[in-house]
Amino acid sequence: MKKPIDIMSMTEKVKNPNYLYAPYGIANWREMARHRKPAHVFSRPPDIQAFFDRLWPAVDNYVAPLHPIFLLDLPHFATSLTRNVWLIRDGLVPLIWFFISNPEPGNFKAQILIHSQFEEYVPEAWRAQAALFDFLPEESEKILETSAKDRDELLLLGQIMPSVCSLEHLEKDLDMILRKVGGKRGLRKMRLNAFLPARYEDSEHSEGPAFYNKFMITLCRYLGADINILEHKQLLEASHFRTSWVHEFNEKHLYVDSHSMRIALSRGGSILILEEKNKQRTHHYETIYPFYPNLSCGISTRFEKKFIDYLTDGAIIESRESAKNYYSALASSSNRSFPWPRWFTSWCKHLLVAESTPASVSSPEAKISEVSLST
């Protein structure tokens, strides 16, 4: 078995922004990505495919350097997909489940890229073969043709689901949006577009059909009803979003890398609300890789924040903001009501707890650490 490739030496630092050495021998990834036809990356077993169907199109497959994948796929495909690096697309809930099941890498030799927002949740034992990533929209010449003040459109993205964005989170986002665009007066100068497909969740813990009515009523109460609703085909066929500010309603409990947001950013859209964590980390990236047209991936192997030890009972200090996020994620619809495949939930059945109850962890029945990757 070959040793895992060090992420930082996998390619040289990119001098030509259009060049990237990829494992497939692709020298001009971006040109290929612009013209390639949609294709399935791989097929999934029926129980897993049913899970992803509920989150379509946010979790649509795509091919890119650094091999984006969901943790749910790893136990079934790690033995057949021989990669040294995996970019993990998951949000906080499945990430916690994965690390509780696998507090140590064991025989898992690949390196994993975790979104920088979840830095504190990566156990110490994993940090030697893990790194943090952020997606970075690029300011190419074409995008710079439209300056920030000339962006007169607002593109809203997301999935209308309690497990993706709660009503409480929706209102917080809408408050920030209004402040960013200059209040109701600034909003009147903008054209509003939205791609917000709804996916019904039926569970004893879910909020029921009224959630979807409340979501749209809340949206219109803040932004008005003059919103152009896009079909998926319109989003895909749009030539550019260079005049658009973009915002996604996503608590990042289920997924952190969404198809819709990636499409919008790759075509010139600019993030309306840049997370403070991303602002603080921009000068810490050791390498920036071309990842998708007009979209790069900043990578850092440095973990600056200590691990929030949710692997040991009673170890979490609830006064810390990250601990609040931990318990909030466990109490959310993403953890309590979303229909995860039964075999996957058996990994972490003890995590289905009340918001104020510390998690009790036992040895999981199935472990990804038993899987060995080779090249």
Image (cartoon, rainbow, N blue to C red):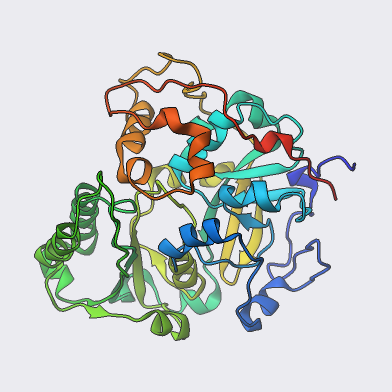
Q: Is residue 60 visible?
A: yes
Quadrant holding the N terminus: top right
For this rendering, which residue is in front, 257 or 313? 313
Residue 5 sits above or below residue 50 on the image: above
Position in image of residue 60 (x %, y %): 52, 67
Vertical arrangement, residue 226 with respect to residue 185, above or below:
below
Left or right: 141, with 213 as reference point: right
Q: Quadrant of residue 373?
A: top right
Q: Residue at x 69, y 31 (%)?
A: 105
Q: Position of residue 190 (x, y in %)?
A: 22, 76
Vertical side of 359 occupied by 204: above or below: below
Q: Nearer the viewer, residue 186 or 160?
A: 160
Please say if 3 is above or below 25.
above
* 222 on left or right of 176: left
Q: Residue at x 62, y 45 (%)?
A: 113
Q: How many marks?
A: 0
The structure residue drawn at horizontal position 77% and vertical position 48%, both measured from the top left corner, is 84
Q: Position of residue 300 (x, y in %)?
A: 62, 42
Left or right of residue 177: residue 346: right
Residue 241: image location, x then y, percent = 41, 78
Residue reaching furthest to the top: 314
- Say which of 327 and 264 sits in front: 327
Asked if residue 280 shows in the view, the reply is no
